Amino acid sequence: MKFGGALMEDAEQISNCASLVAERAKKDNEIVVSVSAMSNVTDQLVAMGESARLGDMEHVRTILAEIEQRHIETAEKLCNESTLCETKENAKKLLETLNQCLTGIFLLRELTPRSKDLLLSFGERLSVGLMRGALIMKGMKTMELTGGEAGIITDSNYGNAKPLLNITEVMVKDRLLPILKGGVVPVVTGFIGQDENAVITTLGRGGSDYTSTILASALEADEVWIWKDVNGIMTADPKVVSGARTIPTLSYAEVMEMAYFGAKVLHPLTVTPVQERRIPIRIRSAYAPKNPGTIIRETGDKDKIVKAVTSIRGLSIITTGGAGMIGVPSVVSRVFSTLAANNVSVVMISQSSSQANISMLIHNSDLEKALKALKVEFRNGDLVRDIHTIPKVAVVAIVGEGMRGTKGVAARLFNAVAEANGNVLCISQGSSELNISFAVVEEDVDKVVQSIHAAFGLDKA
């Protein structure tokens, strides 16, 4: 069971989460719990690290006092006297270590990726203590562990570490199975692992979901339950489409496409560890625990051709063009090598069949450096003569395994776009036929998504 930051917001929420764990554990289920930091704490840690690097320790002390007060007050509301003393003492030790970490950043005026991972780990390390206290109050035997202590071993790519799955599987079994067999519920920090030198690493933002499936795969769990503040994965963003509905069943492939194309319910890598072992993931609401939510498994239902409409905003299109590109394979390689060398991530690609131009969608924040790098790379103008941009665009994608081999999907899609008076800037479809994605100007994205949602009947059961 994994609980996100919104469900770890305060004592009432944490107690509710502990009740969900206790209810299942008392039915003879062996449960591993994974938790995120309390809501907004990770952002506060980022802000403190930056302030310490710039020498503003007054701002650091202000935020640190807020974090301490919040965690201590939450502990006081959650725990009785016997549990409270230990919970507060452990929290204060962690906060003192956090203070030392920030002082080091201040003295060096440097925040390296490695020290930032250490800094960001304190959010989850503080929250596991609160969950442990809450579980004890529900009559559970429990213990807290960091991801590294639980056996998640990663590479040393600080900030976005990748788990070394073979060694992690061995370590997690070795460390957690004896705890589970002893009737104890381990509470593990989400988001955090450690490298082979026992240095703390993080799995990237959203990595708490990833932690839960890494542990589930290693332990060969029956299921992963990711508790959220929503009833499951929706057919569209409910803030955009009022008629958005919960999707009962999705395949691993469908949910990976949705996560990549803007659905914010899951980290894109979440399904990877459990896919091979065919371990289902359930997305459920902690506020409506009887609602079955969404189950993610090997195959989804084929009752609907399209399962969902998603979108990514804040993008720009860069198009490289020129007759010199035609029939010259190295040009494409040079374009993407140049972007990769400048750490620019490409969200979507569209190439004309003439090979005379390539359109790439990138994040707005990367536009300036991408343009500069490409102009330097192709400064001679013999191959690429024209590089132009369209800022403030969004990608809209439809996802569903039912699209495979179904005729007329594209016609219905682009008819819906036309009815919304949207203009398609470029199109991309993978050979898997699992999704069709296209770009529109950002100001049109809401009405385009609403029109597509209605056209494919996603607002109907």
Image (spheres, rainbow, N blue to C red):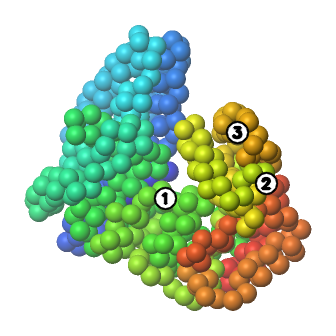
The residue drawn where x is 24% and y is 61% is 218
Q: Depth check: 379 or 150 in front?
A: 379
Amino acid bearing label 1: Pro
Whole-angstrom CA distance, mark 3 to mark 2, is: 14 Å
Looking at the image, is mark 3 or mark 2 nearer the viewer?
2
Looking at the image, is mark 3 or mark 1 nearer the viewer?
3
Q: Earlier in the sequence, mark 1 or mark 2?
A: 1
Whole-angstrom CA distance, mark 3 to mark 1, is: 34 Å
Q: Depth check: 135 or 330 in front?
A: 330
Instruction: Return the residue at label 3.
Output: 378
Q: Could you tell whether 21 is left or right of 209 in the image?
A: left
Q: Earlier in the sequence, mark 3 or mark 1?
A: 1
The local secondary structure at tag 3 comes to loop
The residue drawn where x is 42% and y is 30% is 113
Amino acid bearing label 2: Ala
Q: Which quadrant is home to the C terminus?
A: bottom right
Q: Is residue 393 visible?
A: no
Label at residue 323: 2
Image vertical order of residue 285 relative to residue 178, above or below:
below
Q: Depth check: 319 or 456 in front?
A: 319
**Quarter where residue 111 is shown:** top left
Contact between labelled residues 2 and 1, with CB atoms less than 8 Å apart = no
**Quarter where residue 104 is shown:** top left
Q: Could you tell whether 172 is left or right of 390 in the image?
A: left
The local secondary structure at tag 1 comes to loop
Instruction: Return the residue at label 1.
Output: 268
